[in-house]
Amino acid sequence: MRLPDMLFGRVVRPPSYDAELIDTDLDAINKVTGVVATVRDGRFLGIVAEREEQAIAAREELYKRTHWRI
């Protein structure tokens, strides 16, 4: 797979500073058109996509598929 010259990223932030990440569905997000990679490191969630609008759409979908304990 050849990557485009430029990639776009977005971050999913927790709803509060001390929120605990309970569950997320990165497999479903990886299937969104244009998504190149997803990243989870503790509470950090990130998305890399081929185009900006794809990164934004994937981030919105990831918000829906992520559960936090506040």
Image (cartoon, grey):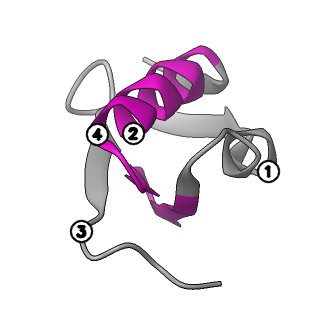
Say what amino acid the circle numbered 2 marks: Ala
**Residue extent of the magenta highlight:** 36-64
Q: Are marks 4 and 2 in contact (CB under 8 Å)?
A: yes
Q: Is residue 4 left or right of residue 27?
A: left
Question: Where 52 sits versus 7, above or below?
Answer: above
**Residue 2 image-quadrant placement:** bottom right
Secondary structure at numbered mark 1: helix
Residue under label 1: 27
Q: Earlier in the sequence, mark 3 or mark 1?
A: 3
Rounded to the nearest angstrom, the CA distance separating label 3 from label 1 is: 23 Å
Q: Residue furthest bottom?
A: 2
Q: Which mark is residue 6?
A: 3
Residue under label 2: 55
Secondary structure at numbered mark 3: loop
Rounded to the nearest angstrom, the CA distance separating label 1 from label 4 is: 20 Å
Rounded to the nearest angstrom, the CA distance separating label 1 from label 2 is: 15 Å
Between disc 3 and disc 2, the foreground one is: 3
Q: Is residue 68 left or right of residue 43?
A: right
Residue 21 or 13: which is nearer the viewer? 13
Q: Earlier in the sequence, mark 3 or mark 4?
A: 3
Q: Per the image, is 51 magenta?
A: yes
Rounded to the nearest angstrom, the CA distance separating label 3 from label 4 is: 10 Å
Q: Earlier in the sequence, mark 1 or mark 4?
A: 1
Say what amino acid the circle numbered 4 marks: Glu
Residue 22 or 26: which is nearer the viewer? 26
Query: Which residue is depicted at the point 41% across and 56% down?
Result: 50
Query: Which residue is depicted at the point 56% across and 29% down?
Result: 62
Q: Earlier in the sequence, mark 3 or mark 2?
A: 3
**CA neighbours of label 3 inside 10 A, class few (<14), some (14 to 19), many (20+):** few
